[in-house]
Amino acid sequence: MNLQKSINHLKKDKHFAPLIKKYGIPDLEGRGRQYFRALARMIIYQQLSGKAAGTILKRFVGLFDNNGRFPTPEQVSKMPMAKLRSAGVSKQKASYLKDLASKFLDGTINQKTLHTLTNDEVTEHLVRVKGIGTWTTHMFMMFTLNRPNVLPTGDFGVRKGFQKVYGLRTMPTHERMEREAKPWREHATAASWYFWQVADDESDI
């Protein structure tokens, strides 16, 4: 992602110029091609507070004799469910992690070509894994694949921030967001970051 290009474009938009001045440059650095790690982490973090998920993630990694390194798909596949549960991972999420590992191992998820797929193809590819839906694929594309044009219209924070920025009476629909986003759609990842900041900010924009 050419973040500076996105910022330069958004600066020309009356909705984003004051946000860029207030919140600065987004923290959207890519995290490399550790795809299994990224997806496993996202599964663990689903529907949990950051602090609780962070604790469970640390315990999960600690189950493996890796000197603190993240486990491989092979290791997760071989780890007994009961052992995964002992780290605080729910039964459902443990089954998701097992399914993720098996699909990396059998080639259902092709990590060598994943970065070459279009956004729609990435979503189609990853939702084959139990527990991975559109929201997770959007986060993966934004923070792991570093795509500049991801607009997670199903994310509550993005929708809430969008509502504030555009002065809407109600939460926007997917269709409304896509329509309003046309002038900056190719830079939607950075725009979404600003929506998150606005959603979390109790002060006026």
Image: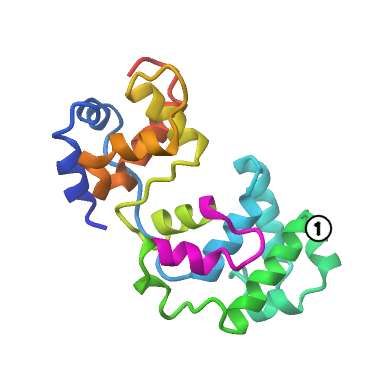
Looking at the image, residue 114 lies above or below residue 105:
above
Q: Is residue 138 left or right of residue 44?
A: left
Q: Residue at x 70, y 63 (%)?
A: 96
Q: Residue at x 70, y 74 (%)?
A: 76
Q: Amino acid at mark 1?
A: Lys
Q: Is residue 153 left or right of residue 116?
A: right
Q: Position of residue 41 (x, y in %)?
A: 59, 58
Quadrant for residue 75, please give it.
Answer: bottom right
Image quadrant assignment for residue 164: top left
Q: Is residue 68 left or right of residue 162?
A: right
Return the residue found at the far bottom: 106
Q: Position of residue 36 (x, y in %)?
A: 55, 70
**Residue 199 belongs to magenta span:** no
Quadrant in the rendering for residue 106: bottom right
Q: Residue at x 44, y 41 (%)?
A: 153
Look at the image and tell me in which quarter the C terminus lies.
top left
Colour scheme shown:
rainbow
Query: Which percent across, then down, holds residue 126?
Result: 53, 66
Foreground pick, 49 / 116? 116
Q: Nearer the viewer, residue 106 or 201?
A: 106
158 to 131, vertically: above or below: above
- Which residue is at a point 35% across and 66% down the rendered structure image? 118
Tell me where the magenta segment starts and ends, as one range: 120-135
Q: Secondary structure at mark 1?
A: helix
